[in-house]
Amino acid sequence: QSVLTQPPSVSAAPGQKVTISCSGSSSNIGNAYVSWYQQLPGTAPKLLIYDNNKRPSGIPDRFSGSKSGTSATLGITGLQAGDEATYYCGTWDTTLSTGHVVFGGGTKLTFL
Amino acid sequence: QVQLVQSGAEVKKPGASVKVSCKASGFTFTRHYIHWVRQAPGQGLEWMGKINPSGSSTSYAQKFQGRVTMTRDTSTNTAYLELSSLRFEDTAIYYCARDMEEFSSAARFDSWGQGTLVTVSS
């Protein structure tokens, strides 16, 4: 059971737009920045979004992030074949005194 | 370019220990936190802990306290993860990851190693 809640899967057609939600609490998303990662099969995760809505160099603006309260959302527009992957949200959680990083369970994006 | 290269796959028996290495290049190793994240087969990401840029301080996930040791050798730009008292459920891919901003531990993992598969089998 992951601390952050994501839908297990989403489906969309190539060229369309999809959003992936990530729900947490005041001890994590509510008081920390959120990052999003893309993991293609058999590869390491890749940073897509950090600080809720910033894109690292090289990440196309088809990928966007937002946060409101204790939830965050990843948006992907103009879906392409290479976007079929599993997406994870992550952030700090301050439930324990030392703090720790928590991730969502992952959302698998598949094409219709 | 920034690169993290990890050691090869390991097969261990229950109760044994494993040590995974993560060699860094392309950036100033002594300015970035290194985190370790694992992924069991078909499962999600699980954070294990972090080590500060100088190697003088570590923070471990509560789940692994007492079994995990993270170190780093600044002379060879290599970070290490050692996990002891291995159990079948420790079978996973273990990743090292760099925290993006210098001297900051904000959990922005902008570079990842290729992963090391650790299999615990009798």
Image (cartoon, coloured by chain):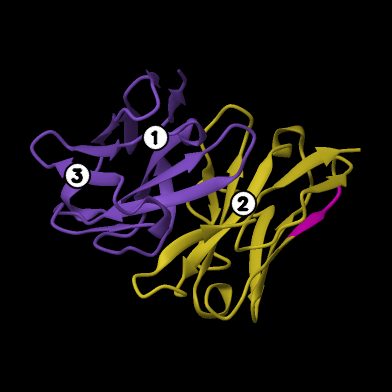
Chain colours: A yellow, B purple
Circle 2 residues within 10 Å: few <14, some 14–19, many ≥20: many
At 40% from the left edge and 43% from the top edge, which residue is drawn?
A: B111
Residue B8: tell me if it is visible: yes
Are the residues tagged 1 and 3 within 8 Å (C-beta)? no
Residue indicated by mark 3 = B71
Mark 3 vs mark 2, CA separation in Å:
27 Å
Label 1 amino acid? Gly
Tell me the quarter of the image containing the N terminus of chain B: top left
The one of B122 and B120 positioned closer to us in this rendering: B122
Circle 3 residues within 10 Å: few <14, some 14–19, many ≥20: many
Circle 1 residues within 10 Å: few <14, some 14–19, many ≥20: many
Q: Position of residue B121 (x, y in %)?
A: 47, 20
The one of B101 and B40 positioned closer to us in this rendering: B40
The magenta span reads: A16-20
Label 3 amino acid? Thr
Q: Position of residue A98 (x, y in %)?
A: 34, 70
Label 2 amino acid? Tyr
- Please give left or right for residue A10 compared with residue B14 in the image: right
